Image (cartoon, rainbow, N blue to C red):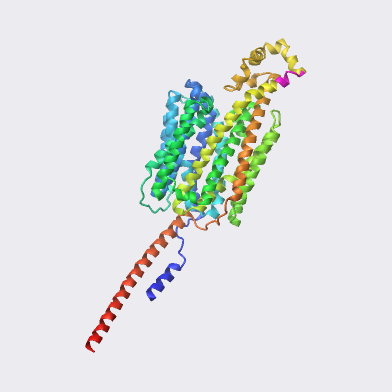
Amino acid sequence: MSSGNSTAGAVAAPTPAPGGLSHRQILTILSGLMIGMFLAALDQTIVSTAIRTIADDLHGLSEQAWTTTAYLITSTIATPLYGKLSDIYGRKPFFLAAISIFVVGSVACTFSTSMIELAAFRAFQGLGAGGLMSLALAIIGDIVPPRERARYQGYILAVFATSSVLGPLVGGFLAGQSTILGIAGWRWVFLVNVPIGMIALVVVAKVLNVPHVRREQRIDWWGAVTIAVGVVPLLLVAEQGRDWGWLSGRSLACYVIGVVGVVAWILVERRMGDAALIPMRLFGNKVFSQTSVLSVLVGMGMFGGMLMIPQYLQIVKGASPTKSGLLMLPLMLGMMAASILTGQLTARSGRYKIFPVIGTALMVVAMLLFHYEVQWNTALPETMAYMLLFGIGLGFTMQTLTLSVQNAVPAKDMGVATASATFFRQLGATVGTAVFLSVLFSTVGDKIGNAFTAASKTPQFQAALHDPAVVGKPANQPVVQMLQHPAAGGGSSSVLSDSSFIQRLDAVFAAPFKQGFADSMHTVFLLGAVVMVVAFVLVLFIKEVPLRSVSGIQAQAQAHAKAQADAKAVAQDEAGVVVDAGDRATAQDESEEVTDSA
């Protein structure tokens, strides 16, 4: 029928892509997102710098790890929940909620009277942090087409570079003050989040106006519960296993509960279908599943490297936390420059797979250089050159992986996909941190012992050992006691809990400690290089999907318009079938009447 043909032609016509934003509108929205991301990024670097002072003031040095563990667990668990809920109800209310929770948690941390209280308040703060990063990246995916999205990566990484430099400076300054306006200096580490958070709330509420089509869908609460049951014990043992013992009763209980929880989560997600927290159908997408594994590996390698380099600068080179943050600047600048270059080239060519291939290869080379070339007495400029190389590798890799995931899934799953990429990267970072620190501290005692054995045969060491002025110094007593009672291992064992005494030793006694630490770090960097080799191989097998030319909201608008057009076409076709059937029935009746009259 003619009506059916005209309908088919209408459906076949290209659907316009409404909802595009100008460069100025995108930058306006981006300003609000950057403040929110800056809030979370700055907090992590400030707290890590000041945590030793905080623990001393609250008399809980042995409990300080729980403040990090609690924050990490809640932020990791909350990430996929933010992604799913924002896909259903929209990004803005949940981004505002994440900022609000984070600010309230910061105020609560300010009034902590013990490390246990601080850990509880940091856990609450982490519930907000879980949404700040993932939702910001999802919103960028909503408003910017994949091919143009890489252009804006420089702004995002500028936030991380700025926070990595400002964080140690601000944290060191605040922690070093006895009081500011009658409040202990370290409490301002958390209070400083309040004005930044209030600015973020005002800016985001004003500028973040992204259209959203609400989808009626069940909320996967059982998925949230089971993923928490599965992941929390595994994160817990990853953070605390070195102190508990990896095969202790508590660790084994965590392994069992974690495996049961993960299995239960998979069963729940399969049953929930599209309503699942992370729909299982996404893992049928090879790009999504392979990139998820790659995110875990890159998270391990990235945080492994970024954890070991400050350790080297502070323990071996004697840099303060503030100075080590400044010395890390080449890594951050390399990451930012590489990301901007990646964005420009991706926007021009539409190709992106080559960048994580180059990036993972550069990270392998950088880690091997740290393994083979960086010794305890290596000049800082040489070490900083390797940091720059590592940063360039990260810049080529990090944002491109997020871009790949966002481009490979339907626009309606933008939040879930982005949050999943962040979630898997955080898991990798946690596992990598636990494994690398375990390797470091399990080998450093023997490495220091070997270094002392070799050094003790040198004339300089023997001369110092028989010099009453050197041996009599109080600062040198840990080494003297260790040499007099080698079975006790005093100095080499105490260094595992407090390495600050190394910088007070005479150079001849300090050198073996520094060499032992450097040798242990060599092992960690080699392990990191192996992880990144696996990541490099996996990148080669990831399919490069052509980048979409429309943003997430444009793609959703297209899909919505097409669904409406399809529904209208079906309705018209059904109506046409009814009309045709009626015409045939009428003609048949008339034919029968003519036959009867004849």
Vertical relation: 347 (above or below) 248: below
Image coords of residue 393 (percent x, y): 63, 43
Q: Residue, x 67% and y 28% (percent of image)?
A: 519
Vertical relation: 284 (above or below) 164: below
Image coords of residue 413 (percent x, y): 45, 51
Say which of 383 and 193 sits in front: 383
In this image, 478 relative to 257: left or right?
A: right
Res 513 visible? no
Tally of marks: 0
Residue extending furthest toward the left = 597
Vertical relation: 103 (above or below) 144: above
Image coords of residue 377 (percent x, y): 71, 28
In this image, 474 relative to 561: left or right?
A: right
- Image quadrant in which the C terminus is located: bottom left
In this image, 209 relative to 405: left or right?
A: left
Q: Which residues are magenta?
A: 453-458
